[in-house]
Amino acid sequence: MTQRVVVGMSGGVDSSVAALLLKEQGYAVEALFMKNWKETASDGSCLWETDVRDAMEVCDRLGIAINTVDLSAEYWQGVFAGFLHEYDAGRTPNPDVLCNQEVKFKAFLNFALGQSADLLATGHYARIAARNGSRLLLKGADAGKDQSYFLCRLTQAQLQRSMFPVGDLLKADVRKLAARAGLATHAKKDSTGICFVGERPFRDFLSRFLPARPGEIFDADGRVLGKHEGVHFYTIGQRQGLGIGGVSGMADAAWYVARKDPVQNTLLVVQGHDHPLLFSRRLRACGIHWLGMAPDAPLRCTAKIRYRQPDQGCVIDAIDGERVTVTFDKPQRAIAPGQYVVFYDTEACIGSAVIDNVD
């Protein structure tokens, strides 16, 4: 029996080519567009209108049916509410990881399965391999586009039901395939910004939900250098938007956020991209999630503390329930609490945890 695959169509070139490849491979393909944000733009238009129009045009070209599903309530509850809570607490969350965990591969996957689909496919640059009855999440073949970092919270059950058709391809080849097939999205710019919220000035967007709480900016010697608008507007390692410029009697070098204190409502800043206070070798993280069997500590592996960071050698020193302690071979710059540390065994993503604090 031909397997029925629902493709999560975003209106971009990657999901378009995912649908193209699956149809060429003989699957029974249908498309589903997710509406996860109900807000309108300043001109009154819906922020997803262009994307759904592009997705419909691609599906018309491919001769496949497309439907839409409104998951805005699930997105707000499962992703955005926690996103705001974390920022309000002075941490730096990653909504794209949460969106995959709570919406795309939970609410959306369940909806697709409820519509009698066998599998869900998306345009993520990652791969899935079978080993001893379980599934491995592997990096995408295009190192510059690999999205395994964002998929680090998936479960075995979700991986069993998921497909990533473009994971073996380079982005340039994806665009060539789309152009050759006459797909309208072949030259469409990749989307950036908050998952499903779009591209916009981040501070302006966040200030609509979290009020400004001005406080003082200090240097490492305790001198007050200026005022900030609220610690939730800044992240560790940030340079832009500090508003302190040159300081009389001090070297003319850029300032960077080194520490945030949400309790005292203060920022500690330092001068120079490579200032020692921006580096740490050790972190503690909570909410550990393993994609397969939980390993024993100590465990030598590699890890990323942010998307697109090259793999960093490290040792998971201790695993205590849902908490882990990690020591890196080399000091890491600008480790931000709230972000994910994602662990790898060569090409395989093996687990992740939420960064809590650093030494």
Image (cartoon, rainbow, N blue to C red):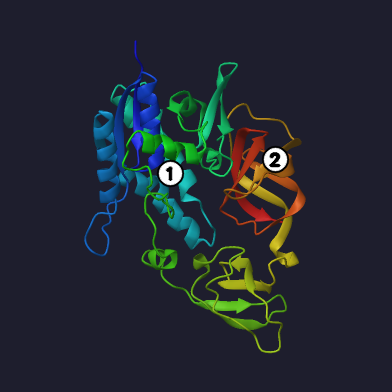
Q: Is residue 286 left or right of residue 158?
A: right
Location of residue 280 by image quarter: bottom right
- Residue 242 position (above or below residue 179): below
**Vertical side of 328 occupied by 244: above or below:** below
Q: Position of residue 273 (x, y in %)?
A: 68, 67
For marks 2 and 1 on the same chain, the one whose residue lies earlier in the sequence: 1
- Badge count: 2
Between marks 2 and 1 in the image, the one whose residue lies nearer the viewer: 2
Quarter of the rendering occupied by the N terminus = top left
Camera-side residue of 271 and 285: 271
Q: Position of residue 161 (x, y in %)?
A: 43, 24
Q: Residues within 10 Å of mark 2 (few under 14, many from 20)?
A: many
Q: Position of residue 19 (x, y in %)?
A: 36, 30
Name the foreground residue: 100 vs 317: 100
Give the image location of residue 314, x and y in percent.
74, 43
Q: Residue furthest top?
A: 1
* CA separation in Å, label 2 and label 1: 24 Å
Q: Nearer the viewer, residue 256 or 293?
A: 256
Mark 2: amino acid = Thr
Give the numbered dot on residue 112.
none
Q: Which residue is mark 1?
A: 99
| SS state under label 2 | strand
Q: Residue at x 29, y 40 (%)?
A: 55
Look at the numbered disc 1 and give the secondary structure of its residue. helix
Q: Residue at x 58, y 31 (%)?
A: 138
Q: Is residue 339 visible?
A: yes
Residue located farthest toward the left when viewing the structure as drawn: 44
> Does residue 152 sit above or below 81 in this rendering?
above
Which amino acid, mark 1?
A: Cys
Residue 294, located in which quarter of the rendered image?
top right
Label drawn at residue 302: 2
Left or right of 219: which side holds 5?
A: left
